[in-house]
Amino acid sequence: MNLRYLLPSVQKPLLIFTPLQDTHIQAAVKCSKKLQIHLRIRSGGHDYEGASYATEIDKPFIILDFAKLQNISVDIEDETAWVEAGATVGELYYRIAEKSNVHGFPAGLYTSVGIGGHITGGAYGAMVRKFGLAADNAIDARIIDVNGRILDRKSMGEDLFWAIRGGAGGSFGVIVAWKLKLVRVPPIVTYFMIKKTMGDDDVKVFDRWQHECDKFDDNLIVKATMRAIKAKHEGERKVRIEYQGLYLGGASKVVGIMRRKFPELGFSRNDCHEMTWIESVMYMGGYPNGTSIDVLLEGKPNFRYYFKAKSDFVRKPIPETAIREIWKRLKEGKGNVLFTPFGGMMNRISESVIPFPNRNGTMYMIQYVASWNDGLKSEVMHMKWVRNLYNFMKPYVSNNPRTAYVNYRDFDLGINDKKYFK
């Protein structure tokens, strides 16, 4: 996914081993331990710093690739699913929708992420305000430990089961499969996307969003994104601001909520698109209108480029001067800044239940992304841009410590920095 880690200068594995069953994983773990060969575990290959398929350690390594471990068993009567670690988020969504139009699962927006590593970092998505994290809804697991033993929740014990649900991928063993608790969704949900070229008035609109985003009805999430775009004239760059929303219910109710809580957006019934939950997965994941849900079975990302990303959590509204500075910096660089609201169920789950501590009082999460297409040619410029923006935001985000999201791994912070876990 991140082409930075496919450059010729990046150290390559001795081999890529693709197990077909649990005993193959056990053999790989024991063999790598005996031969002292470093082991990388790849369920989806989406680690932001390439830690699932590359290394910055000057030692030989192999990749344990779960591409063939994709079995999904959905039990609608029990409202659970066993999902092998190599299955993608999109495949899980598809298999649930095959059996029920009133069940779903609260995992990520990007459907090509491998479910194995995704949940080990917590995993949030479009239903985070209603149902919490994917890891909050994981009820059992199969894991292979350093000695090659296969453990489930009972045999691994509650301490280890606690740690693997948010304590970072590759830390405690090899996740083979997760047992997940499905959630109920209505037969009709409402999606909307409002896009504007950012102007002075939009600073105040965004300011209103940040004061309300974590306080909406739990059934509603409204994400905001500021995105650098090319203007008509060469060399000029503008910023588009997008408000993307999902409401677990019909359009008439969400119109009432938005008019009461966020009138500055100018929201109307014409902005609403009613659909099934599985159809909303396609829209929230950025697929073009009309794309068949069958694409979810391909497990391929719908974008690949060179990028560097960083993250923050916000506990009080940032001032308008900071909003204007983000806008200004986006006009000067090629990047996106994404704002994902929390609140709702996230406020009602203790920060110690699993190793994901950014709960009650966190208004929203920020992700800063610099991306480019010309490899090493402009890498220094883009890396500098995102790092400078991150440094600028220090006074306005969580502190003591400044926190970050472990699934957006950032080697600038160290390998497993306390910033991920407070």
Image (tube, rainbow, N blue to C red):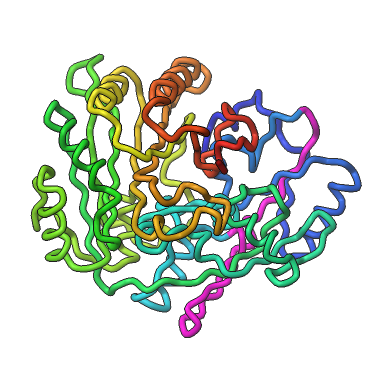
| 391 versus 201 height, above or below | above
Residue 173 or residue 85, whichever sits in front = 173
Q: Which stretch appears magenta?
A: 58-86
Determine the residue located farthest toward the bottom in the rendered image: 77
Measured from the top left, where is residue 29 in percent x and y?
A: 81, 53
In the shown orientation, is residue 221 left or right of residue 139? left
Measured from the top left, where is residue 265 in percent x and y?
A: 13, 44
Asked whether the viewer can see residue 306, the reply is no
Residue 236 found in image quarter: top left
Count of marks, rendered view:
0
Q: Quadrant of the C terminus?
A: top right
Residue 392 or residue 178, whichever sits in front = 392
Whether the magenta-drawn stretch holds residue 67 is answered as yes
Asked whether the viewer can see residue 417, the reply is yes
Residue drawn where x is 29% and y is 38% of the image: 225
Residue 325 found in image quarter: top left
Residue drawn where x is 74% and y is 30% of the image: 57
Residue drawn where x is 53% and y is 50% of the image: 356
Residue 18 or residue 227, whichever sits in front = 227
In the shown orientation, is residue 202 left or right of residue 157? left
Determine the residue located farthest toward the right in the rendered image: 34
Whether the magenta-drawn stretch holds residue 55 is answered as no
Residue drawn where x is 90% and y is 44% of the image: 35
Measured from the top left, where is residue 208 in percent x and y?
A: 19, 40
Measured from the top left, where is residue 353 in percent x and y?
A: 55, 59
